Image: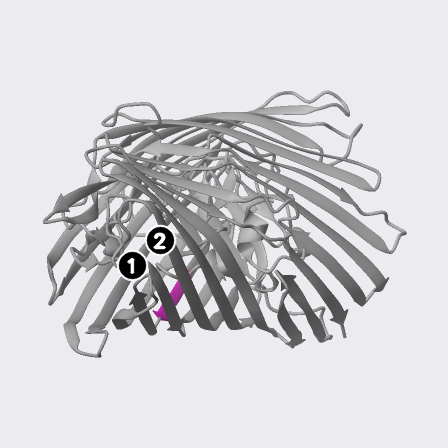
């Protein structure tokens, strides 16, 4: 892991609220607890100072590709304080400090990724670096309550006067199924123009075998459901990039990303009722097919001005669409067809953003910056549902459409100030506003304003260094952040389950009265660089954090005419706090890294026990060891990842528990020569089963426990540079 400088010291807000927007976070966001080292070319001019008040963990290109991972989720799960949900049976979801659900700002090239973009499933070969910040700066989104993860796509170019071609071909194997992949990159230069085109073609397989057990007391119930889910995903990804520098002052960059997928999902359920009554459809099968398209492009311009000033502007756009066909066939115990439900649906999102920033050194010790961001997003969705009986007779028909629009604006100003050679500070102020409007033929209109002021203060004190000895630093950050509800949380549209509606398997519906969550947080960290007597990158740090959240969003389940529905509501205040440790050391050919996190939370409006933030694990951590001798042809390494139980209670009657997880990943790299390598990797080698539990403790109490079988994934890839 590498650490990159984000800017010099900072703090003194010199002017009032000024139009602005953060440039594409091409420099790392602020984060306590991490020693910062300058990496040339990764950041803007503010990164040239020797020490940074605001820093970020930067996962470099070498670490991203080291394990030969198939997705960015596998790379992120090894980073400090980050856990990944959904590995057993759903799309991966990123958590920082145990908080997910859009508490984490996910950025692509510095701009917020749209809903449904699934940034964590990007192919690692398309990524240049990942910047991880636990404390926001005002140049980034104010919606970074738990932190920020910024993914920077591959840069353009090759050594001057040369072209470069890289090809990777191989296959993964999981549960006896092959998943081939092919990746190619070509880059070069032509005078002031540099270019790169990266293309990836791969097949992903995710076979799931699980058993669900439902138990109840009033009435008595014991039901077992064995089910399988076979998902095949074919992916085509393209990432072109052009960079043009016509003179010493100006530079233009055009970058794009296109991903086309084909997903085929086949699920079968076989239910056995030991006590009580079976569901309406004890045997069922489902077929789901979709062809999602995700497209992104941005055009950025940078100009150097006199006096060390710089101005930048960026125009970016997203387009996502997902037309899908779903067929559900419900059968009785004799396997006779009782009902067929077909659904054709498709959301489409488009978003355009114009942003810019200006920065200038002032009075030798200050660096002033201001910027703006103006964006507009539209979402349309259709849903055509038809239900037929055993003989094909029509039972139900529904045609639903809705549209929604989000207008976003943000303005910031910040000052970074070197108070003394050992003490620096940063102070910034950001105002962010969102207005969401929408309506549909099956939902009430929505018109919601959300926004917040986000003042942020960070300071760094560097203790005196002994000659050749360790260097200690102390970091403090105070920030105000928020989380606005998304479109799906606001639209009062109902999404029905096909079978067995209950308090622990309810329909879903949005709430147009939902308000933003607001958080005030404080971070304190002590970090040490061990000095020249040890490895130059040997560091460790210990930090604590505390956040107080207002208008926390919880999901409540209600029953009406025998139908249970889950709806999000604001439910008062919550507290989140934690302790974090991160360290790395190297000796000769060996390098080791350790990170641990302990999290606590409390929701005031819910009685204990387990009145915690939903899905927050009590602890998480990684231990890694790499062996890379300079003269040898073989590198190898291993990472052990652990995530503790996540128990929570969202109301007096609803409780959930996600079991602890342990994962062991290994890799080995054989270097035939300077241009040819063979990489072998395996993930989930321990293949521990994953357990999920959902309970309703009210009238007609129910408990639902699902056990997912986990299989290791083996991957063998040949890498060739031409």
From the viewer's perspective, tell me whether residue 660 is left or right of residue 612: right
Total numbered labels: 2
Q: Is residue 315 magenta?
A: yes
Q: Where residue 297 sits: x, y (%)? A: 43, 70
Q: Residue placed at 36% from the left, 59% from the top?
A: 355
Q: Quadrant of the C terminus?
A: bottom right
| Residue placed under numbered mark 1 in the picture | 374
Rate crowding at label 2 as few (under 14), some (14 to 19) or many (20 or more) other CA atoms within 10 Å: many
* Of 58 and 19, the residue lying toward us: 58
Q: Mark 2 vs mark 1: which is more N-terminal?
A: 2
Q: Is residue 461 magenta?
A: no
Q: Is residue 333 visible?
A: yes
Helix, strand or loop under label 1: strand
Q: Where residue 516 sits: x, y (%)? A: 23, 42
| Residue 159 position by quadrant | bottom right
Q: Where residue 133 sits: x, y (%)? A: 49, 41
| Residue 499 position by quadrant | bottom left
| Residue placed under numbered mark 2 in the picture | 21
Q: Where residue 612 sits: x, y (%)? A: 35, 30
From the viewer's perspective, tell me whether residue 494 is left or right of residue 675: left
* Of 544 and 373, the residue lying toward us: 544
From the viewer's perspective, tell me whether residue 5 is left or right of residue 12: right
Looking at the image, residue 355 lies above or below residue 422: below
Rate crowding at label 1 as few (under 14), some (14 to 19) or many (20 or more) other CA atoms within 10 Å: many
Marks 2/1: CA–CA distance? 8 Å
Q: Are marks 2 and 1 in contact (CB under 8 Å)?
A: yes
Q: Quadrant of the N terminus?
A: top right
Q: Is residue 245 visible?
A: no
Q: Which segment is the magenta one?
A: 313-321
* Of 198 and 478, the residue lying toward us: 198
Prevailing SS of the magenta stretch: strand
């Amino acid at each position: 892991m590498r650490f990159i400088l984000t800017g010099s010291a900072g703090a003194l807000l010199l002017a009032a609220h000024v139009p602005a927007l953060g440039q594409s976070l091409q420099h790392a966001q602020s984060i306590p607890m991490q020693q910062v080292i300058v990496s040339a070319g990764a950041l803007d001019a503010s990164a040239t100072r020797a020490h940074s008040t605001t820093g970020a963990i930067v996962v470099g290109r070498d670490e991203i590709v080291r394990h030969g991972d198939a997705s960015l989720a596998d790379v992120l799960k090894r980073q400090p304080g980050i856990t990944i949900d959904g590995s057993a049976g759903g799309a991966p979801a990123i958590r920082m400090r145990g908080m997910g659900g859009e508490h984490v700002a996910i950025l692509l090239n510095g701009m917020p990724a749209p809903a449904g973009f699934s940034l964590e499933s990007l192919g690692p070969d398309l990524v240049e670096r990942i910047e991880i910040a636990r404390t926001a700066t005002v140049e980034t989104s104010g919606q970074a309550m738990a932190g920020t993860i910024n993914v920077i796509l591959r840069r353009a170019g090759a050594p001057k006067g040369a072209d470069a071609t890289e090809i990777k071909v191989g296959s993964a194997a999981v549960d006896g199924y092959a998943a081939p992949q092919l990746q190619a990159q070509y880059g070069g230069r032509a005078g002031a123009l540099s270019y790169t085109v990266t293309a990836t073609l791969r097949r992903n397989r995710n076979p799931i075998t699980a058993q669900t057990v439902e138990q109840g007391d009033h009435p008595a119930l014991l039901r077992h459901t064995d089910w399988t889910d076979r998902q095949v995903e074919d992916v085509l990804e393209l990432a072109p990039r052009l960079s043009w520098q016509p003179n010493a002052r100006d530079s233009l960059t055009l970058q794009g990303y296109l991903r086309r997928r084909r997903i085929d999902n086949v699920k079968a359920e076989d239910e056995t009722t030991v006590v009580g009554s079976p569901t309406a459809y004890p045997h069922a099968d489902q077929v789901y097919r979709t062809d999602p398209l995700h497209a992104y492009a941005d055009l950025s311009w940078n100009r150097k001005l006199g006096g060390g000033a710089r101005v930048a502007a960026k125009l970016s756009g997203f387009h996502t669409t997902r037309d899908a066909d779903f067929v559900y066939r419900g059968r009785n115990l004799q396997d006779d067809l009782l009902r067929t439900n077909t659904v054709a649906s498709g959301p489409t999102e488009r978003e355009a953003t114009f942003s810019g920033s200006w920065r200038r050194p002032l009075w030798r010790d200050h660096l002033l910056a201001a910027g703006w961001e103006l964006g507009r997003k539209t979402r349309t969705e259709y849903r055509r549902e038809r239900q037929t009986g055993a003989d094909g007779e029509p039972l139900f028909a529904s045609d639903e459409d809705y549209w929604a629009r989000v207008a976003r604006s943000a303005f910031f100003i910040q000052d970074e100030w070197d108070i003394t050679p050992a003490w620096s500070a940063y102070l910034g102020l950001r105002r962010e506003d969102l207005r969401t409007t929408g309506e549909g033929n099956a939902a009430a209109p929505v018109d919601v304003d959300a926004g917040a002021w986000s003042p942020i203060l960070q300071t760094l004190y560097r203790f005196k260094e002994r000659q050749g000895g360790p260097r200690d630093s102390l970091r403090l950050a105070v920030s105000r952040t928020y989380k606005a509800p998304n479109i799906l949380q606001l639209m009062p549209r109902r999404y029905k389950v096909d079978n067995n509606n209950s308090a622990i398997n309810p329909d879903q519906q949005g709430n147009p009265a939902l308000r933003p969550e607001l958080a005030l947080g404080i971070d304190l960290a002590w970090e040490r660089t061990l000095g020249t007597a040890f490895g130059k990158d040997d560091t460790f740090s210990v930090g604590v954090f505390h956040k107080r959240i207002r208008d926390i969003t919880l999901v409540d389940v209600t029953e009406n005419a025998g139908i249970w529905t889950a709806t999000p509501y604001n439910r008062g205040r919550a507290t989140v706090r934690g302790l974090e440790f991160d360290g790395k050391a190297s000796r000769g050919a060996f390098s080791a890294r350790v990170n641990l996190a302990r999290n606590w939370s409390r929701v005031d409006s819910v009685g204990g026990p387990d009145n915690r933030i939903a899905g927050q694990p009590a602890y998480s951590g990684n231990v890694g060891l790499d062996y890379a001798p300079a003269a040898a042809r073989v590198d190898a390494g291993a990472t052990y990842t652990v995530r503790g139980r996540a128990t929570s209670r969202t109301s007096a009657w609803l409780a959930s528990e996600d079991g602890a997880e342990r994962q062991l990943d290994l890799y080995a790299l054989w270097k035939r020569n300077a241009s040819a390598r063979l990489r072998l990797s395996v993930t989930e080698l321990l293949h521990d089963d994953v357990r999920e539990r959902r309970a309703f403790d009210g009238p007609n109490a129910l408990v639902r426990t699902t056990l997912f079988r986990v299989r290791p994934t083996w991957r063998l890839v040949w890498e060739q540079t031409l």
